[in-house]
Amino acid sequence: MSNNGNGNHVKVLVLGAGPAGLSAALYAARAELAPVVLTGMQLGGQAALTHTIENYPGFPEGVGGAQLGELFQKQAEHFGAKVEYDLANEVDFSQRPYKVKTDSGEYKADTVIISTGASPLHLEVPGEVELTGRGVSYCATCDGWFFKDKKVVIVGGGDSAFEEALFITRYASSVTLIHRRDEFRAGAILQKRATEHPKMNFILNTVVTEVLGSDKMEALKLKNVKTGEETIFEADGLFIFIGHKPNTEMFQGRLDMSDLGYIKVNDKMETSAPGVYAAGEAADPHFRQVITSAGMGAAAAIQATRFLEAEEG
């Protein structure tokens, strides 16, 4: 990559190094476009924070999330992708080559593939921010080990809440899953595993209204949404899995987006700017799986390749 005083000029710039970004990089690299991937904050994306991924084809015994990310990266680099530990923080899509400012400089890019993923939603209750890292967590694989023989609460009702709850049962003495509705969204297999697990308990129709504790979390204030009754629930840890919001703030006003902040794409992963594509959870409110993100990344790179070929043609 030549640094000729006017910034680094690349044919394909990929923002984000999760399954979507690294799959895009693999396809672009095999098309000999020498893509550059900016990792952002989380190498391997959210998948890297998952202890075991059981539903990615080719791994009948399951595969570690971080390990799968490393394999994706190795394969992309093997074909000539360059992974830079850098974070994009500003984009200019007004004219091509597009400009992307990062923590360490600026890139000019003929095409951009956005795969910036999503971040966990917070409960937005008193005590949550103050006690994050002191009992409050958003990643069971990162922090589960700290709760050996302790009492843990999980908030959520979807697949990730159940997956993480089951993972934490390895360490915790008890795991109580709290959900604001009277039924769960999680898949049947996960629900069956959880309800049959001796360490698991469930509290339905209930929300956490406050996290209590001074230097570390000691208890939660709970409220039953049907009766309005409030109770104090003593616990050592709180893991929050209530969904995600896409990491797309810097594209606001520059690309067409949904009300929820997802980048709008067509069936070819094209955004409202020519030569700009989006893949993975930044553009996917529906499926949010490693395999669908990887597929979107591959599609985005194929389309970027065709776009560049048409221009050269």
Image: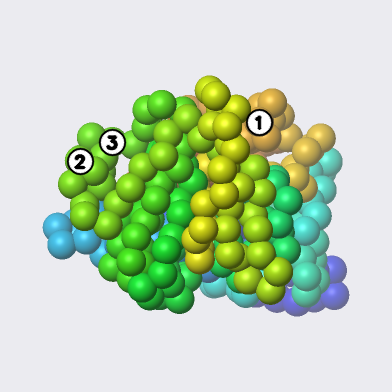
| Residue type marked 3 | Gly
Q: Between disc 2 and disc 1, whose residue precedes? A: 2
Q: Residue 73 carries which label?
A: none
Q: Which mark is residue 192?
A: 2
How far apart marks 1 and 3 lie (CA) works out to: 24 Å
Residue shown at 84% from the left, 68% from the top: 6
Q: Between disc 2 and disc 3, whose residue precedes? A: 3
Question: Which residue is under mark 3?
Answer: 187
In the image, 280 versus 299, the foreground residue is: 280
Residue 183 location, quadrant: top left
| Residue type marked 2 | Lys
- Within-10-Å neighbours for mark 1: few <14, some 14–19, many 20+: few
How far apart marks 2 and 1 lie (CA) works out to: 32 Å
Looking at the picture, does residue 96 appear above or below residue 285? below
- Report x, y in % for residue 294: 40, 49
Question: Which residue is under mark 1?
Answer: 260
Q: What element carries label 1?
A: loop
Looking at the picture, does residue 272 appear above or below residue 241? above
- Report x, y in % for residue 242: 52, 42
- Report x, y in % for residue 286: 46, 31
| Residue type marked 1 | Leu
In the image, 245 versus 132, the foreground residue is: 132
